[in-house]
Image: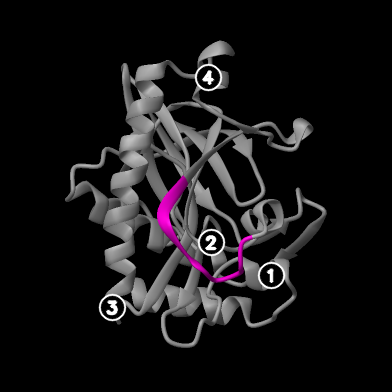
Amino acid sequence: MKKTKLIYEGKAKKLHETEDPDLLVVEFKDDMASLDGRKKGVIKNKGIVNSKISTYIFNFLDSYHIPSHFEKSLSDREILVKRLEMVPIEVIVRNIATGSLCDKYGCKEGDSLQYPIIEFYLKNDKLNDPMMNEYHAAAFGLATPEEMRTIVRFATKVNAILKSFFIRRKVRLVDFKLEFGRFKGQLYLGDEISPDTCRFWDLETGEQLDKDRFRKDMGRVEEAYQEMLRRVLNL
């Protein structure tokens, strides 16, 4: 599929139009950013790792009838996807207490939650991505109540599938971010699923195998990403 025009470049990905108006090419970058872009770096081959992990997981979720924008892999760094009209809401699913959850609610770091928590955040960097709920989504015309129910249903199912998937690979799925969009009137899972968008902890040692290693200056970021790729692919 031939790329025709770069239409977006973000912190971690580029989006290119193609000869088909319904399809885009996603190019994964090695750039790393956190703290709302105040901290930046480059991690060797991160884009390759995230592309391969996302490809594998989107295909795996498809076997469980989770509709996603993923069409096929084009190269080590590029995937072909449906051109979604994105819902400007980040969906966070939490299984283990950590990060902002502990800061806000005083829970103990590392505690398993009795029930997964699903949170919604408005995707707006200028407003620092404020937390919201389904009533905000409806009131501001971001998503209908029916769409929000579908998003919750998909997020809950994805969480159950991936928790089991990663446990078999000796990894705890601590929390993760999902994004959704519309394509021809239907909702699809979009964006990526990778160490950039998930928190992964080794099941036995608790070692962090995700973007937190960069956020917290823990070192060995490239090695952690490569280890997650190895485990996802069961190598």
Q: Residue at x 27, y 65 (%)?
A: 164
Q: Residue at x 61, y 72 (%)?
A: 44
Q: Nearer the viewer, residue 18 or 62?
A: 62
Residue under label 2: 47
Give the number of the mark in front: 4 or 3: 4
Q: Earlier in the sequence, mark 1 or mark 4?
A: 4
Distance from Cα at disc 4 to Cα at disc 3: 42 Å
Name the image quarter holding residue 183. Answer: top left
Residue under label 3: 234
For the residue marked with disc 2, what is the amino acid? Gly
Please report contact status of discs 4 and 3: CB closer than 8 Å, yes or no: no
Q: Earlier in the sequence, mark 3 or mark 1?
A: 1
Distance from Cα at disc 4 to Cα at disc 2: 36 Å
**Residue 92, which numbered label?**
none
Classed neighbour count for the residue bearing mark 4: other residues with Cα under 10 Å, few (<14), some (14–19), many (≥20) = few
Q: Earlier in the sequence, mark 4 or mark 3?
A: 4
Q: Nearer the viewer, residue 30 or 2?
A: 30
Q: Earlier in the sequence, mark 2 or mark 1?
A: 2
For the residue marked with disc 3, what is the amino acid? Asn
Distance from Cα at disc 2 to Cα at disc 1: 15 Å
Q: Position of residue 192 (x, y in %)?
A: 45, 49
Residue interval drawn in magenta? 107-117
Q: Is any part of residue 22 visible from this angle?
A: no
Residue under label 1: 214
Q: Earlier in the sequence, mark 2 or mark 3?
A: 2
The answer to whether 76 appears left or right of 218 in the picture is left
Name the image quarter holding residue 215. Answer: bottom right
Distance from Cα at disc 1 to Cα at disc 4: 35 Å
Vertical comparison of 157 with 140: above or below? below
Could you tell me which secondary element the residue under label 4 belongs to? helix
Residue under label 4: 135
